[in-house]
Image (cartoon, coloured by chain):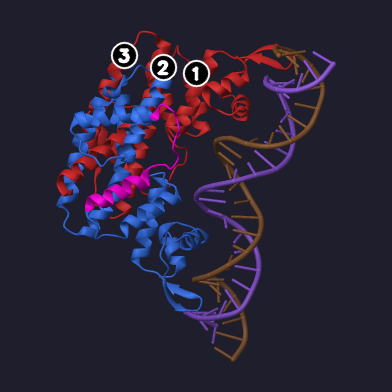
Chain colours: A blue, B red, C brown, D purple
Amino acid sequence: MRISDLSRESGVPIPTVKFYLREGLLPPGQRTARNQATYDERHLRRLHLVRTLAEVGGLSLESIRRVLNALARPDWPLHEVLAVAHTALRRDETSSDPSLPAARLEIDTWIARRGWNLAPGTPAADDVAETLVALRRLGWDAGPEIFDRYAEHADAIAEAEIAYVAETNDPESAVEATVIGTVLFGRALASLRLLAQEHHSRKRFGP
Amino acid sequence: MRISDLSRESGVPIPTVKFYLREGLLPPGQRTARNQATYDERHLRRLHLVRTLAEVGGLSLESIRRVLNALARPDWPLHEVLAVAHTALRRDETSSDPSLPAARLEIDTWIARRGWNLAPGTPAADDVAETLVALRRLGWDAGPEIFDRYAEHADAIAEAEIAYVAETNDPESAVEATVIGTVLFGRALASLRLLAQEHHSRKRFGP
DNA sequence: TGCTAGTGGGTAGTGGCACTATCCGCAATA
DNA sequence: TATTGCGGATAGTGCCACTACCCACTAGCA
């Protein structure tokens, strides 16, 4: 399989494939001559993965690079991989709102009350704190309890998801399923929420 | 309130405020002279909203513009506003995968089986179909039922959300709450899922 | 053997997005 | 009166994700 086959099978233009190779998002092919190399199914699969994470998941190439590093370590314990994937998925900017540390403490207390056992400093908790700060800035008189219902459902969803990957025996598949699942089902959940909103909105207010 | 006050109160640099004014994301102030104008609380609030949708919600300025158009029509029936908000929130690219129409049909059938009553051609359903296509391209042998559990929870969440805005009497607040809630609680739900994943992963595999 | 399409590798250029800088004549304020 | 700030306009910046072009070289066919 040469670069043109890779391009045709995946629908990704050749210059872009070359770009991914340069950027290290795609490992180099097997060299057969000074200016020739062959690629295999794994390259094609990786190319699909990169494109899917970028287009469906909306990740930056930098985030994708970090996620792929997690994939390169299938020997890691699964919860390490999950942590790396979660960190990789975070967008990098940090809003430096002065009231964020206080909100973060509130969220930490609330998390503890929920009985969730998390590594201290988990990045996703910052996102929740940031959302709380944003709500207040927009005039909502909200405490962390406003997220209770969401947390309830998130817990049920996550429990099933973790149970699912725990069933998988092959560690490499488990790692990949974790990364793909985190991104793709995250997107699916968001879309399904919108669909459900539309359904209930129609039921209540619709024609 | 002059432009410098607006900037100081919001933390947004003056050139950026000017930029938002030019782009129509912020309505012009009350002119008091050829080169003077005053702004009020509503401008500050709008500025906060634009920044929050951009930074926390990750929306493009183009999406924000569309969302703001929905806000400009508080007389609309709420399910219209919701539809506009949902359309505005979609990222604009359309993956032209050849197997997407078929997947879309599968999703439509599945939606009907669920008993969800939706406008035909709802954009969010395309996103679900796209996710299904992506999963298959990555080797998952999946049908729409793979989303069953997510749909279950999304339904419960959305029902509570719609019930909440239905309680609000002031139509203007209801519209704004709808837009803010759709974006911010969407983000919160995603983060909470990651937190819950970490909790359950630790419980099962952790130290 | 000769010919041409294709290849890997490198450098440079492109387009879009979200700002950011600078300049101008005028207004406000000390 | 002098300085600071304002609004409006035009132009420039930095980043990101490609995309174009060029080169010497190779594969595959005539």
Q: Is residue B50 left or right of residue A121?
A: right
Q: Nearer the viewer, residue A18 or A70?
A: A70
Above-or-below relation of A22 to B127: below
Q: Is residue B97 visible?
A: no
What's the amino acid at mark 2? Answer: Gly
What's the amino acid at mark 3? Answer: Ala
Q: Residues within 10 Å of mark 1 (few under 14, many from 20)?
A: some
Q: Quadrant of residue B18?
A: top right
Q: Nearer the viewer, residue A15 or A143?
A: A143
- Work out whether mark 1 precedes mark 3 in sequence or the reverse, and give the earlier one: 1
Q: Quadrant of residue A45?
A: bottom left
Instruction: Please name the residue shown 36% across and 56% down the image.
Output: A68
Q: Which residue is mark 3?
A: B166
Above-or-below relation of A50 to B39: below
Q: Are marks 1 and 2 in contact (CB under 8 Å)?
A: yes
| Residues at marks 2 and 3 on the same chain | no
Q: Which residue is mark 2?
A: A139
> Magenta span covers which residues?
A78-100
Distance of mark 1 from mark 2, alpha carbons? 9 Å
